[in-house]
Amino acid sequence: MNKILYFLLALLITFSSCKSNDPADTLEVNPKSLSFDFLGGVSILDVITTASSYTCTSNKDWCTVVISGNKITVTVSGNPTDASRSAIVQLKIPEKTLNVNLTQTGSAAILRDSIALTKFKLLSATTGWTAGTPMNTWAGVKVELVGGERRVTELDLHGKSLAGAVPVEIKDLTELTYLDLSDNALTGNLPPMGTLTKLIVLDLSINKLTGSLPADITSSTSLAYLSMGQNKFTGALPAQYSSLTALSVLDLGINNLTDAIPTSWSALTKLRYFYLYGNTLSGSIPSYISTFSKLINLSLEYNNLTGSIPTGIGGIATLTDLTLSKNRLTGAIPADLSANANWNTWKTDVLNQQTGYVLSQSAPSQVKGMSSAKVQQMNSIQLKAHVLPAKNQFYK
């Protein structure tokens, strides 16, 4: 009997010894630490474990984790401050706990950009921007690496029902090369924009902006596309725009601008689209326009321009559209204009001057014999916005 008891006791001891030597479940993760820049982003953790299941948690609400099999997706939102921040992603099985340390940098520059964009978001509910998501995922916003920092380089908010004044914080978007706020309901005077020195495209057209045209945009010598038409700007055309020698498009049509076309604008020889129509400009058409050899469209109609049409405009080989009607022009039609292959297309947009003002009898014979009904028909032509070329033709 004693032998049987000894045998059972030995068997129990052996069984207990074998059980205690069973290996514990393993848990490994790769990578063991994570780093994000201030824009945030997504990273994948690889998990290796012998356990049937494991848990994963984050100790910060700006860092979320989702388990899918042996993969963990870690998502970090943008850092809204200029200070770095940290979080811990913790993995657990009954026998073991692992911590993945996570760090995220901050940026004073991107913080300023973020605040500026937030001001635009307050102007409208149609931007479609979601708070807490990285700015580079927002519609109309492009973020690029500039000088070792990620900055906002493009902002396209055309047709987003923006209302109110343009935020003064726009001055902080100093790496912008493309800014389109057109087709909105923006009002008031423009804030200082002289810090936006890298602009290539600036479109503020079709708003309700007032005050003088901004002279400080001349700080952006790379500006190729400038459209501020269909607003309520007043005052004279800035002579300083003569420094914008990279301009291909200049649209200031349908405003309340006065005085003469500056003589200094003779430097704008790269202009292809030159729109000043629908203002109350006075003085003569500058003769230097005939030297703009790349000109495609010249639109000066509906102003108070006087004098004669300069010789040479009709000789610009690239010119396909010319509108000078509804001014107070007199004198002879230059021979190069009437001889141009497009004359029959242009003539109603040249000869139709304001009531009481007509071009001289030196006009081509087909104009002299024009019926009164035809003249009346031309006088009923309504002011219309001219079409501008696609901005991407001038951008990068």
Image (cartoon, rainbow, N blue to C red):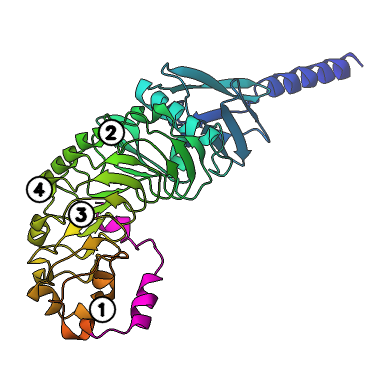
At label 2, which amino acid type do we have?
Leu
C-alpha separation, residue under disc 3 versus residue under disc 2:
19 Å
Q: Residue at x 69, y 20 (%)?
A: 20
From this view, report whether residue 371 is shown above or below residue 24.
below
Looking at marks 2 and 4 on the same chain, the residue that comes earlier in the sequence is marked by: 2
Looking at marks 3 and 4 on the same chain, the residue that comes earlier in the sequence is marked by: 3
Q: Which of 145 and 65 lies nearest the eye of the viewer?
A: 145
Looking at marks 3 and 2 on the same chain, the residue that comes earlier in the sequence is marked by: 2
- Image mark count: 4
Q: Which residue is mark 4?
A: 267
SS class of the residue under badge 2? loop
Q: Residue at x 40, y 27 (%)?
A: 168
* Mark 2–mark 4 CB contact (< 8 Å): no
Q: Which quadrant of the figure has residue 382? A: bottom left
Q: Residue at x 38, y 76 (%)?
A: 376
Q: Position of residue 344 (x, y in %)?
A: 23, 81
Q: Is residue 314 magenta?
A: no
SS class of the residue under badge 1? helix
Residue 248: mark: 3
Q: Which residues are magenta?
A: 369-396
C-alpha separation, residue under disc 3 versus residue under disc 1:
24 Å
SS class of the residue under badge 4? helix
At label 4, which amino acid type do we have?
Ala
* Mark 3–mark 1 CB contact (< 8 Å): no
Looking at marks 3 and 1 on the same chain, the residue that comes earlier in the sequence is marked by: 3
Nearest to the eye among marks 2 and 4: give it: 4
Q: Which residue is mark 1?
A: 345
Looking at marks 1 and 2 on the same chain, the residue that comes earlier in the sequence is marked by: 2
Q: Position of residue 369 (x, y in %)?
A: 24, 86
C-alpha separation, residue under disc 1 versus residue under disc 4:
29 Å
Task: Using a 10 Å C-alpha cutoff, classify the residue at mark 2 as few (fewer than 14 neighbours), some (14 to 19) or many (20 or more).
Answer: many
Q: Position of residue 259 (x, y in %)?
A: 23, 44
